[in-house]
Amino acid sequence: MTSLTQKFNRTFGADMAGPVIAFIAVMVVFGTLADNFLSLGTFGSVSFQLPELGLLTLAMLLPLLTGGINLSITFAANLSGLAAAWVLQAQGGVNAPPSAFLLACLAALLTGAAVGALTGAAIAYTRAHPILITLSMMIFLRGLGEFLTRGGDISGFPGYVSTIGQGSVLGLPIPLVIFIACVGLWHILLTRAKLGFGLLMIGSNIESARYSGLNTRRILVLVYTLSGMMCAVAGLIMLARFNSVRVGHGESYLLITVLAAFLGGVNPFGGFGRVLPVFVALIVLQLLSSGLNLMGANQHLATALWGVLMIVVMAARTLASKLSAARGRKV
């Protein structure tokens, strides 16, 4: 058993064990208790629901790896979606040409990047805790969005926009294809790019990173800028799926993104984490939600169970760390 575990860790990484075990447990439990859980309908539903949460989790991942957090991701996504919606409305609304959607995407990405850069600069240059800065940004973006929309929503987009949100290519939902592409991009960033190495160094020890010659301020600004741009992608997907934009879309996803990251083996204090285990953890959480729905459970129960799961994951990781430290002292 030990050799099998060691072989698994060498092949997939030790941080993949938890998500894989959770995936197997969910499949066995709900495959037994819930009718039609192991069906194409269930996995089709998961594939359409996964991208929104997944993209927001990717936006949360980079700040977490630096030892920070980004509490403004959902409102940055919605504000970016609003920027795209205003461009489409200005270009004719339901009659807007495809070129207008390209301009809308550019406006969304620039909005997300601006929000992220402002957040990152505030964190890097004031050295205030990311919780305080991003909480302040969250409140600001929410108030700004409510002011600009007067508490309502913006709708009325061309038909091809909803096709992007609801359509498929080669049997896969278009939002899922976009999400998988973003997962691949983040994986390359963290494993091949200097920025990925730098942000992990900052998460491990920002003072050591600074003394080793890394421009920690520049890296932090880039990290939050990329986080904001990923929020913009999420905002565009939500716009396409719901055919409308409002400030509160996806608000309930905020803490679930943190849960997905921790379930995927990301160190709560920064410095360690990979994209692929987080991807598997997202699938587990979405399957858990779908299984509870098939059993007739209230959606609020799923949210409550996600909270319990976060506590269990953190307690299990703390216990595992103590046991590992105890074995090290014995050796």
Image: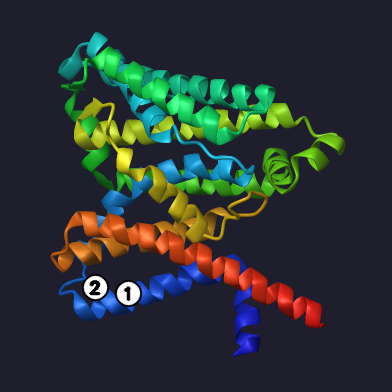
Q: Few, some or many C-alpha atoms within 10 Å of disc 1 (few <14, some 14-19, many ≥20)?
A: some
Q: In the figure, is residue 110 to the left or right of 39?
A: right
Of 16 and 310, nearer the camera is 310
State the CA–CA distance, disc 2 to disc 1: 8 Å
Disc 1 residue type (three-letter): Met
The residue positioned 43% from the left and 59% from the top of the image is: 310
Q: Which residue is identified by label 2? A: 38
> What kind of colouring is applied to the model shown?
rainbow
Ranked by sequence position, the earlier of labels 2 and 1 is 1
SS category of the residue bearing label 1: helix
The quarter of the rendered structure image containing the C terminus is bottom right
Task: Say if 155 sits above or below 255 in the image.
Answer: above
The residue positioned 80% from the left and 77% from the top of the image is: 329
Residue 127 percent coordinates (x, y):
67, 28
Residue with the most extreme left position: 296
Of 315 and 198, nearer the camera is 315
Task: Say if 32 sits above or below 26 in the image.
Answer: below
Disc 2 residue type (three-letter): Leu
Q: Which residue is identified by label 1? A: 27
Would you say the residues marked 2 and 1 are in contact, meaning their CB atoms lie under 8 Å apart? yes
Residue 317 percent coordinates (x, y):
56, 67
The quarter of the rendered structure image containing the N terminus is bottom right
Q: In the figure, is residue 146 to the left or right of 141?
A: left
